[in-house]
Amino acid sequence: MIYWMPGEAMNEIMVGDLSEFTEGGYRVLRVDSFEFGIFRQGDRLVAYENHCPHDGGPVCQGKVIPRVEEELAPDQTSRGLRFSKKRNIVCPWHGWEFDIETGRHCGDPKYRLRPIDVKVRDNRVYVSVPPAA
Ligand code: FES
């Protein structure tokens, strides 16, 4: 894990063409000792440091799966489980699941993946990495 302060100047680097990031897919990249994952969700890219807040596992290398939701009746009885259109990243070490859109743990939102700034300009993908990377 690399430490940096909020507001600290970051280094922007180009990591590839947008076409290299396929819909629903992801890439895990490394800049020196800094690892991160970039996930494509439709027209949007999100990126997180590859460090699980549970125990430091390589969370961005886990599976990306549809979220399972339980529909409740007005009396709070279950109408059954169903797959959502939303997706989660599952950490490969102990199975913690994180909302791919927000990086927050699905059961306890005080745990979250550390977001990395990612931008697309002229069909190229840029990320901001800490200067110590
Ligand atoms: S290190 Fe990720 S779930 Fe434990």
Image (cartoon, rainbow, N blue to C red):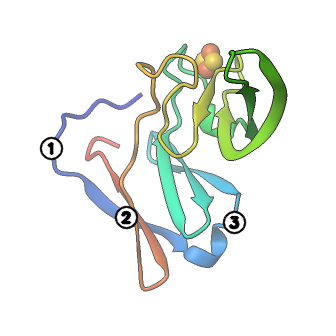
Residue sitting farthest toward the front: 75
Mark 2 and mark 3 in contact (Cβ < 8 Å)? no
From mark 1 to mark 2, how far is it between C-alphas? 17 Å
Q: Residue 16, image x and y in percent? A: 53, 71
- Residue 114 in sight here: yes
Find disc 3 in the rendering and name its residue.
Answer: 23
Relative to 75, is 56 on the left or the right? left
Counting residues from the start of the chain, the first of labels 1 and 2 encountered is 1
Nearest to the eye among marks 3 and 2: give it. 3
Kind of residue at badge 2: Ile
Image quarter for residue 120? bottom left
Q: Residue 31, image x and y in percent? A: 45, 50
Find disc 2 in the rendering and name its residue.
Answer: 13
Find disc 1 in the rendering and name its residue.
Answer: 7
- Residue 58 in sight here: no
From mark 1 to mark 3, how far is it between C-alphas? 31 Å
Image quarter for residue 42? bottom right
Counting residues from the start of the chain, the first of labels 1 and 3 encountered is 1
Counting residues from the start of the chain, the first of labels 3 and 2 encountered is 2
Mark 2 and mark 1 in contact (Cβ < 8 Å)? no
Relative to 91, is 119 on the left or the right? left
The C terminus: image quadrant? top left
